[in-house]
């Protein structure tokens, strides 16, 4: 059977992936785990999320699905932070006999949960219509993520995937500062990059795979296959680990991006890949955020932002000028696209006017007064008008991304990019 779970944590602690890891061990009393558990990231703009909008799915071969259901429900009742208003757990159970029937329905639901906004009613109606075994707590919003995660498990071959090794803290340490040896993460990165990524941010000298919140996660190593994330995790020196799990995940796949032909169709709470021409010089606003507009062929405009947490990425964005052709990916909130990646496709030629150079002395001539042309101060040579010359642009075409410390879970890191015809600049 497939078990989907979501929305068990709060800002004060817990993590649905921890519950998944715990159940993965405990449910072996009732059956055999068939495949790696799934950690599925859903629409990153959803306001109900606690942190990264993750849901979990497990697949177990069993003769006693009812016992599994009872165990999962009791563990959620025991561990979920029900007292938090935003915590509304949901769990869904799909029996093997229903896999084929539910596979296409839940595939569409998964895609919608990643790219669009779903009402709780829609999840509940689907559960009723297809007679799916489920249990929602409080308003049951977690049923959305639970159904989506089951959709991912039923359609494993249809979506790009990566892996994450998640190590969890011993219970008595929860809520206390994490004891980790920073240098060991840099060592692990040196030995396993580019098979792993986002362990550290080298330019900003940061360990990015250790959370700072009260949840049970000690660290998470992301990478291309289970062997490499396990190899990197083994190199980490830190406080004792209670348990770990290697999840198959849609992190780092760009699965959230919708292609859009016109800016007119863009909506808040959705993520896009779109092309346009820079239509204003980037400006830095209070807080250090850099904003500029782009325009599409029909003249529609949208503001695009490299926010302060994107650090050095803003240096690149500040080099853009009106006329540059770009393709951007990112999420839209409050009418502004939060840039995850940018492809600089064509760099506009810019010109400026300069006083002419003296052909004899090589010095810049001085103006002789309004409408009187220019004169060389040294030899007296005269020129009628200013020279128009091309400005040297300190910008190269190619693909750029925000640094690891600012990466969205679903954003595909450039280190995973296979396109050899593009000038790719992975951030490290
Ligand atoms: P957790 O570790 O508990 O999963 P989280 O940061 O991943 O924490 P949740 O606490 O799960 O976030 O909150 C996200 C909520 O939003 C869940 O109830 C989930 O079902 C719901 N949700 C996910 N995707 C969508 C969507 N596309 N439309 C509407 N609701 C969604």
Image: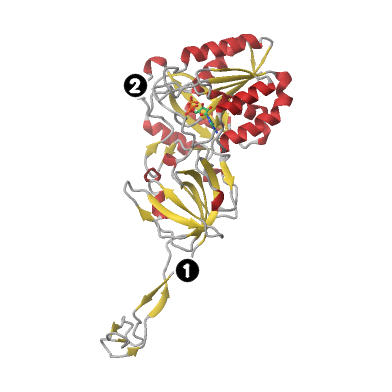
Relative to 305, say whether 177 is above or below.
Answer: above
Relative to 310, say whether 82 is above or below.
Answer: above
Label number found at residue 239: none
For label 2, the crowd category at 10 Å Cα-Cα, with few meaning under 14, some 14 to 19 and many 20 or more, is few
Image location of residue 159, percent across then percent down? 64, 36
Label number found at residue 349: 1
Which residue does the numbered mark 2 point to in the structure image? 176
Residue 203, located in which quarter of the rendered image? top left
Q: In the drawing, does residue 101 fall left or right of residue 354?
A: right
Does dot 2 land on a helix, a strand or a loop? loop
- The residue positioned 45% from the left and 51% from the top of the image is 304
Image location of residue 359, percent across then percent down? 36, 86
Q: Are marks 1 and 2 in contact (CB under 8 Å)?
A: no
| Front residue (pair 289, 404) | 289
Relative to 279, say whether 369 is above or below.
Answer: below
| Front residue (pair 164, 20) | 20
Does dot 1 land on a helix, a strand or a loop? loop
Q: CA distance from mark 1 to mark 2?
A: 55 Å
Label 2, ligand 1: CB separation under 8 Å:
no
């Amino acid at each position: 059977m497939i078990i989907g779970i979501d929305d068990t944590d709060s800002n004060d602690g817990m993590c649905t992936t921890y519950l998944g890891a715990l159940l993965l061990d405990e449910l072996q009393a009732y059956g055999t785990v068939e495949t790696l558990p799934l950690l599925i990231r859903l629409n990153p703009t959803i306001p109900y999320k606690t942190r990264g909008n993750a849901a979990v799915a497990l697949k177990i071969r069993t003769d006693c699905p009812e016992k599994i259901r009872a165990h999962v429900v009791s563990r959620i009742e025991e561990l979920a932070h029900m007292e938090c208003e935003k915590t509304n757990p949901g769990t869904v159970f799909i029996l093997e006999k229903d896999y084929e029937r539910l596979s296409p329905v839940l595939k569409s639901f998964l895609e919608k949960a990643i790219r669009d906004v779903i009402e709780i009613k829609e999840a509940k109606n689907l559960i009723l219509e297809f007679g799916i075994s489920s249990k929602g707590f409080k308003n049951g919003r977690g049923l959305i993520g639970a159904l989506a995660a089951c959709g991912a498990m039923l359609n494993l071959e249809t979506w790009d995937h990566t892996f994450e090794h998640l190590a969890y803290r011993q219970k008595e340490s929860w809520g206390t500062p994490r004891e980790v040896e920073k240098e060991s993460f840099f060592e692990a990165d040196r030995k396993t990059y580019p098979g792993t990524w986002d362990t550290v941010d080298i330019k900003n000298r940061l360990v990015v795979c250790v959370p700072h919140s009260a949840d049970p996660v000690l660290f998470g190593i992301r990478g291309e296959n289970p062997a490499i994330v396990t190899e990197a995790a083994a190199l980490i020196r830190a406080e004792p680990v209670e348990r770990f799990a290697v999840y198959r995940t849609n992190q780092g796949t760009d699965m959230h991006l919708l292609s859009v032909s016109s800016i007119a169709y863009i909506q808040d709470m959705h993520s896009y890949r779109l092309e346009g021409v820079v239509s204003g010089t980037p400006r830095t606003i209070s807080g250090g955020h850099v904003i500029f507009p782009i325009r599409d062929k029909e003249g529609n405009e949208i503001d695009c932002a490299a926010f302060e947490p994107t650090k050095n990425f803003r240096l690149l964005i500040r080099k853009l000028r009106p006329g540059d052709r770009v393709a951007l990916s990112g999420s839209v909130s409050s009418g502004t696209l939060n840039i995850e990646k940018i492809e600089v496709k064509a760099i506009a030629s810019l010109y400026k006017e300069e006083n002419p150079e003296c052909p004899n002395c090589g010095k810049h001539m001085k103006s002789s007064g309004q409408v009187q042309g220019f004169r060389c101060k040294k030899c007296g040579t005269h020129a009628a008008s200013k020279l128009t010359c091309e400005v040297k642009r300190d910008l190269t075409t190619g693909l750029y991304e925000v640094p690891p410390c600012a990466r969205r879970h679903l954003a595909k890191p450039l280190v995973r990019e296979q396109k050899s015809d593009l000038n790719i600049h992975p951030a490290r």
